[in-house]
Amino acid sequence: MICARTVFRCFKTLERWGNIVTGAAGPYFVGLAVILISSGVVCFFDVLAPTLSYPLLSIPICMLIALNMLMHYYYAITVKPGFLDEPPREAGTSLLWAKKAVTKGKQKELTGGVQWSTRGVKITPAALTKCWKCDRVRPERAHHCRICNKCVLKYDHHCPVSGINQCVGLHNERHFVLFMAYLSFASFCYCSLGYETFLDSLGITVVYGQPWPHHSPEILFSLVYILAMVMCFAVGVMFAWHMYGITSGETSVELQDHDTYRQKAKERKEEFVNSYNLGRKKNLAFFFNIGEGGYSLWTLFFPFRIQPYTDGYAWARKEGYEQHQGVRRGEELTDDEDEEEV
Ligand SMILES: [Zn+2]
Ligand SMILES: [Zn+2]
């Protein structure tokens, strides 16, 4: 994964530059992103959708993909990531909220707040530390965001440039990842279905042999096409990187921190074990909160809101581990060190 890590570092650098350039202009970038994504959707349904075979089947599928992309984007920018001072959140009752599958057997509560999930995994209360910046007690996996100036539960990163303009954490990480998945897939569809039209608009080939017959302007179609090519690659790489982190049971911050812990443990001839790593399949199931004890697999294909499996104050652990192995007390990286490194 050295190659992937290098690519990711490049993206991190780009993001940092973007951060400096955008500064307080974050909200304008949200506006720009909304205009660009909507233009893409309009161009697709105006120019490319009528050319699809089996329209009765393919057009509803395309509409569902577009709806997922737009709704997960809306959730990623409007659902707050989860801050320390908030009361616990409950699942909503509106139609936007998925209903939980009926679970076989309830969660058994054990002493000391330790629980066994119906998925056969031990969920233990998070260790508490103090944040010196906001002077509050916080559970493990929470980090202080210097842009929001608050501690965020299961902090992943602060996303300023891609139009999200807020932190990605416990409550919106699922929407953020699904938005990246749908955006890169939709861009891929746009590029692969529209290349002939794009070449025609450049005057390289002739498809229509007549003036541009669509409602959306030719120049808009071509500009969106170029943007879609960039997005398909850039967002695709970011999505792949996040999926790698999710399957390893690590957030973006932890991917970097755990590298350091691994190195330190290696110097002592020990092995670092990430106690959040339950194995690929379970990591994915817990992240998306699907499968037994969670929501249906279908919630990945419809733009529903769902609750994470935890409130951010308890974490599912690898069998036999109450905490990470190979890290000693006082060796845990603080937010300051993270900031220097990022
Ligand atoms: Zn803090
Ligand atoms: Zn933030």
Image: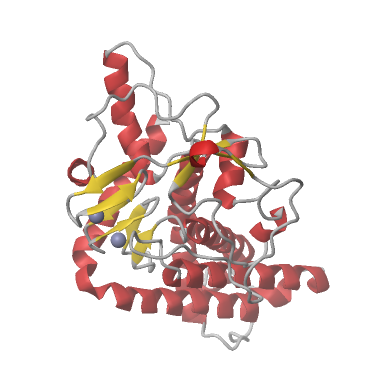
Where, quadrant-wise, is the N terminus in this rendering? Answer: top left
Q: Residue at x 34, y 53 (%)?
A: 157
Q: Is residue 202 visible?
A: no
Where, quadrant-wise, is the C terminus in this rendering? Answer: top left
Seen in the image, is 274 located left or right of residue 115?
left
Q: Is residue 109 visible?
A: yes
Compared with 213, 176 (above or below) is above
Seen in the image, is 314 located left or right of residue 85?
right
The image shows residue 113 at horizontal and vertical percentages of: 50, 42
Compared with 275, 12 (above or below) is below
Q: Residue at x 47, y 35 (%)?
A: 276
Q: Residue at x 62, y 67 (%)?
A: 304
Residue toward you, 239 or 294: 294
User: Looking at the rendering, which quadrant does residue 84 occupy?
Assistant: bottom left
The image shows residue 8 at horizontal and vertical percentages of: 36, 43
Residue toward you, 314 or 235: 314
Q: Residue at x 34, y 65 (%)?
A: 166
- Label count reads 0
User: Looking at the rendering, which quadrant does residue 234 occupy?
Assistant: bottom left
Of all residues shown, which one is farthest toward the front?
111
User: Looking at the rendering, which quadrant does residue 189 occupy?
Assistant: bottom right
Seen in the image, is 71 located left or right of residue 8?
right
The image shows residue 50 at horizontal and vertical percentages of: 72, 77
Seen in the image, is 329 located left or right of residue 99?
left
The image shows residue 11 at horizontal and vertical percentages of: 33, 49
Q: Quadrant of ligand 2?
A: bottom left
Residue toward you, 222 or 166: 166
Colour style of the rendered protein structure: secondary structure
